Image (cartoon, coloured by chain):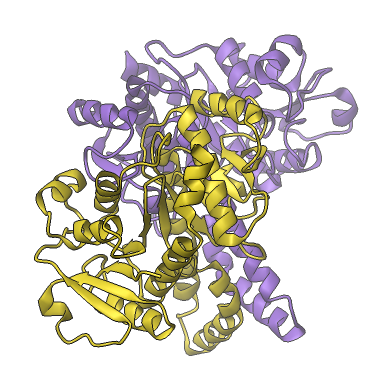
Chain colours: A purple, B yellow
Amino acid sequence: MLPVALDVMGGDNAPEEILKGAFIAADEDIPVILVGPESVLKDVDHPRISKFFVSQAIAMDEDPALAVRQKKDSSIVRGVELVKDLKASAFVSAGNTGAVMAASLFRLGRIKNVSRPGIATPLPVPNRKPVVLIDAGANTECKSEWLVQFAHMGSIFSKQRFDIKQPKVALLSNGEEAGKGSILVKDTYELLSREPTKDFEFIGNCEGRDILTTQADVIVTDGFTGNVALKTLEGSLKFFINTLIAVLSQSTELKELLEKIFSVLAPVATQLDPETTGGAMLLGVKGVSVISHGSSSAKAIVNAIKAAYSMAQADLVTKLEESFN
Amino acid sequence: MLPVALDVMGGDNAPEEILKGAFIAADEDIPVILVGPESVLKDVDHPRISKFFVSQAIAMDEDPALAVRQKKDSSIVRGVELVKDLKASAFVSAGNTGAVMAASLFRLGRIKNVSRPGIATPLPVPNRKPVVLIDAGANTECKSEWLVQFAHMGSIFSKQRFDIKQPKVALLSNGEEAGKGSILVKDTYELLSREPTKDFEFIGNCEGRDILTTQADVIVTDGFTGNVALKTLEGSLKFFINTLIAVLSQSTELKELLEKIFSVLAPVATQLDPETTGGAMLLGVKGVSVISHGSSSAKAIVNAIKAAYSMAQADLVTKLEESFN
């Protein structure tokens, strides 16, 4: 297999945590090609790590389309090009999400018959395999036909990535009953009900409160709602943990309690840790492009590299192409 | 002051918890008029509780518009009518949200110049006054002008209810930067930036992850997104607590730990308990109409009655009318 191209300059913890992640992945036999400036990479030495030097980097807050157009020698643009030029099997970045999307779309191109690529984010859910939320933010305004395509793409991803035979698909709405929802949701509901179920089984609407307890393997929504739901989830869990820590840090006795709780919660926390789910994947482009969280640690990067590598091995793009053919 | 009309038949815990709540409120000197069937109310006896008998009840899962049209002698329809007929100062129900909305809209009517009533839900946020989310679910499809009106109504509510002098308003979006968001959000951003700030200060976009840590006093969104965000929040906090309980119930030793934690967390939990914030309020109709959560306990009902009573005392409707005049 070709190596995984890794954006060394992307994310809040770049380049240190990114490099650390690359070494761990390479130690576990995954070939990696680091994409970054020579100054950062010159001392890197590992039998399964190669390097590709670039002169530019796209910042987290740059305008994505503009940055991709202007910074042709950036780690994001070059990294995606390595996939296009068959020098890498997949691309991983914890950098500017919009820029990774734009570069992937412009350089790799869309899969035939796919209207819009969508971001598939696996959500860790306890006692079961991760649930795939799609679209988690690529398309702010959506058409119902696109959501139907997200259902197909998310299901194929869920199948390949988490080995789920016939994924169950739910539509995120403001009520469980059929007929509840925005015009977009109602139209999509209609279409999904009539859709041939070769890729998935449509199980109806779900609500925000079902996301962590859902029966579904794939939750379909537009990119605006998906982003709001995902960040609300993220914010509230972070908030709860911080509250727990703050309250239990008030005295030495309580601090001991906190340590005890965390040691007991650790295995559960691992199950729930978004860093273990391997990053979001841009589905619908002709290549494997993985977007890791901006705050990714080395661990998140390792898991993103593994996810990218396994999706390249599983030939996810061909499977998507076949389904849309 | 006129009594608060209370729907005895609304909610998952009706009529027991509702009646319990009514008694506590009445003991605290708030006059209440119970609206329910004679069979349920016949033995109720309290100097500050009066009764209004009805022959029908609207179930939680009934079609709201249809139910309100057909069940003219239901507790929801009659309760709202008591407000209209100046027999009650406000109406409180933990029943079918859509039916309360429909009855309030049809029977009380809209405030002049208000395009659409919106649901304002106070969210408990630690170390500060509650944040008002509007629209939390009344209008699935919205126009930008309506969102601007929600900003005004939410701010006036925030002022009266939580004594905030110049509420800060944020717009829920998929990115903090100006220019991020759906067409609706972008248009609303434009309008809010130009809006005279007599009622509030517009502070820009906020994201899902900011809801529990926001600087804003009012978060404006459409009813679809508001519902998804609210329920995601609700679901994830419930999920976290259940996880904590499940993990710490595995042994006697851990159970002791759990009790200790909960005793320490209790004051914080009270601060965060949605039951203490007094229910959601339908703003924009000519009367005070409070929608309590379907799972409301007696405590939630007491706080909803108090909130309704204090909003009637503060003459919230007149303040809204003045602002829209």
Residue A178: % across, % down = 21, 40
Q: Is residue B317 above or below residue B51?
A: above
Q: Is residue A162 above or below residue B126?
A: above
Looking at the image, which residue is at 56% across and 35% down?
B173
Looking at the image, which residue is at 38% across and 45% down?
B137
Q: Nearer the viewer, residue A262 or B112?
A: B112
Looking at the image, which residue is at 32% across and 26% down?
A148
Residue A45: % across, % down = 82, 34
Q: Is residue B229 above or below residue A197?
A: below
Q: A255 left or right of A45?
A: left
Residue B201: % across, % down = 67, 41
- Total marks shown come to 0
Query: Dividing the picture into quarters, in which one does residue B19 lie?
Result: bottom left
Q: A1 left or right of B245?
A: right
Residue A109: % across, % down = 52, 11
Asked whether residue A4 appears in the rendered view, the answer is no
Asked whether residue B2 appears in the rendered view, the answer is yes
Q: Nearer the viewer, residue A19 or B31?
A: B31
Query: Dividing the picture into quarters, in which one does residue A88 lie?
Result: top right
Q: A261 left or right of B184?
A: right
Q: B182 left or right of A67?
A: left
Q: Nearer the viewer, residue B27 or B176?
A: B27
Q: Is residue B313 above or below residue A278?
A: below
